[in-house]
Amino acid sequence: MPRPGRNTYSDQKPPYSYISLTAMAIQSCPEKMLPLSEIYKFIMDRFPYYRENTQRWQNSLRHNLSFNDCFIKIPRRPDQPGKGSFWALHPSCGDMFENGSFLRRRKRFKVMASDPLAPSKPSDAAHYLQQQAKLRLSALAAGGTHLPQMSSYNLGVSQPSTFKHPFAIENIIAREYKMPGGLAFSTMQSMSAGYPLHNQLTTAWPHMYSTSVIDTAAPISMASSDYSAYGMPIKSLCHGGQTLPAIPVPIKPTPASVPGLSALPAHIPAFLSNSPQSLSPTSPQTATSQSSPATPSEALTNPASALQSVAVH
DNA sequence: TTCTGTTTAGCCAACT
DNA sequence: AGTTGGCTAAACAGAA
């Protein structure tokens, strides 16, 4: 059984579609909106695979941004000089990856005229999102650690303040993981709803599910120190203590992936290091209380430190 | 000139 | 088998 090496990622295409990669990039920044160049940068930083053939995949990515309604183009304000617009996720694009696969959505998100969440005009969405970004930046500037949540459209439909965008990293990583053999691990949300796997998993990874490790009441902070080496808000990784081994599922199981807790696809990104693989009971918990690993590859080989970063915050 | 954004088309694979 | 979604290529226009 091959173990993922330091360069595993450079060799394999990550099990994510361009849509999910783009969504990750957008969700990783406090403003929840990024210019195209920053999306490129995010992907290349995290996934060495995409440091090659840039023309090809960047063309595809641009195509996706334009083609898919789940992405919204937000014009730059006069005080935001630069090339190109910002891109954000449509707040009502729904849980497009609810089937657990980040390669293929169950259904393409399409803004319907009858959608109560749909803005009456496309510019409404852009304006709304820009206001949200402003609020976030204001909160940052004020030194606050409690940023306003990405709330729903101000269109008469309210959502709970705890609403997490389906593409938020915490949601992406906290998905049901269907093991190649058919065994499924459910999300903490599901487990808290009474799934029997809870006991098994808390036994297997007590350090993950112990609420004493993770401050469930901690507000999500966007201070720079709260970001892991992968640009992910660390606290997002433990969304309300709901840290779960949820792994995106390649449509085609890779040779490295075999059924079993310690045999997961080798190309799972390090920022999803709260996976069974990294958190297997046999994994050495040698992490110190220092910050997250310097490089994604380091986290890949030392996932425990990444977890520690999550746990101590 | 380069980058960004849009659109069309074809192919392939997963899903129903 | 038909449908749908994702990837790739390409052409084109507009902005920086």
Image (tube, coloured by chain):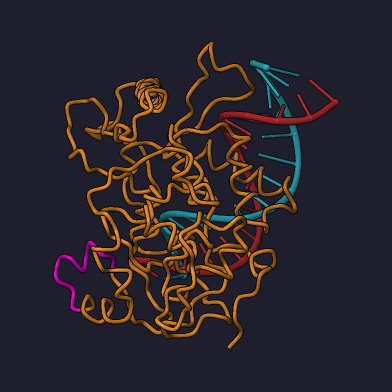
Chain colours: A orange, B red, C cyan
- Which corner quadrant of the image does residue A100 belong to? bottom left
Q: Is residue A193 magenta?
A: yes
The magenta stretch spans which residues? A187-196
Residue extending farthest to the front is A289
Residue extending farthest to the top is A78
Q: Residue at point 43% right, 32% down?
A: A31
Instruction: Report x, y in % for residue A110.
Output: 37, 41
Q: Is residue A254 left or right of residue A10?
A: left
- Which corner quadrant of the image does residue C13 belong to? top right
* Vertical relation: A274 (above or below) A148: below
Instruction: Report x, y in % for residue A272.
Output: 46, 62
The N terminus of chain A lies in which quarter of the figure? bottom right
Q: Residue at point 52% right, 77% down?
A: A253
* Vertical relation: A159 (above or below) A44: above
Between A22 and B9, the residue placed more toward the observer is A22
* Vertical relation: A46 (above or below) A191: above
Instruction: Report x, y in % for residue A158.
Output: 17, 33
Q: In the rendered picture of this protein, how many numbered marks are placed on residues?
A: 0
